[in-house]
Amino acid sequence: MKYNYTTSGTCSRAIEFEIDGDGRVHNVTFVGGCNGNLKGIGALVEGLPVAEVVSRLEGIRCGVKSTSCPDQLACALKQV
């Protein structure tokens, strides 16, 4: 199933991703933000179970911000 999540507190504005029937993450793309870094995150989480992605990314901060693009991906995955 395909999802679109509006981010908060980050340079990226949204995250698009899919979760397959086995609960694995696919095709993560960020709208806005640091293009190369965010493509890297998408590639690194490709095919991983949702719970594993959340456990790896949740709580990561960007500088003095209370969140980050990876943390926002964890939030998005927890919401669905």
Image: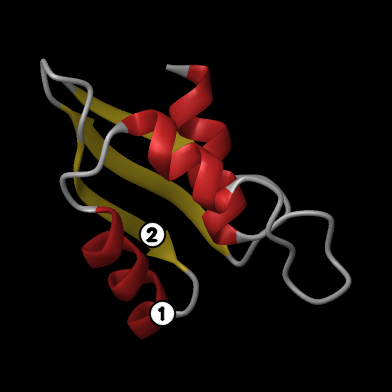
Q: Secondary structure at mark 1?
A: helix
Compared across the picture, whether 53 is left or right of 18 comes to right
- Neighbour class for label 1 at 10 Å: few (<14), some, many (≥20)? few
Mark number for residue 63? none
For marks 2 and 1, the one nearer the N-term is 2
Percent from the top left, x then y, of residue 19?
21, 27
Q: Secondary structure at mark 2?
A: strand
The residue that appears at 51% across and 24% down in the rendered structure is 78
What residue would you read off at disc 1? 37
Snapshot colouring: secondary structure
Mark number for residue 31? 2
- In-front residue for pair 67/6: 67
Instruction: Kindly report which numbered mark, 2 or 1, lies closer to the viewer in this rendering.
Output: 1
Compared across the picture, whether 50 is left or right of 6 comes to left
The quarter of the displayed image where residue 30 is located: bottom left
Q: Looking at this rendering, what residue extends furthest in the right direction?
A: 64
The quarter of the displayed image where residue 38 is located: bottom left
Compared across the picture, whether 12 is left or right of 52 comes to right
The residue that appears at 61% across and 67% down in the rendered structure is 11
The residue that appears at 61% across and 50% down in the rendered structure is 71
9 is higher (above) or lower (below) than 52: below
Percent from the top left, x then y, of residue 40?
31, 74
The kind of residue on which mark 2 rests is Val
The kind of residue on which mark 1 rests is Asn
58 is higher (above) or lower (below) than 38: above
- In-front residue for pair 20/2: 20
Q: Name the quadrant of the C terminus.
A: top left
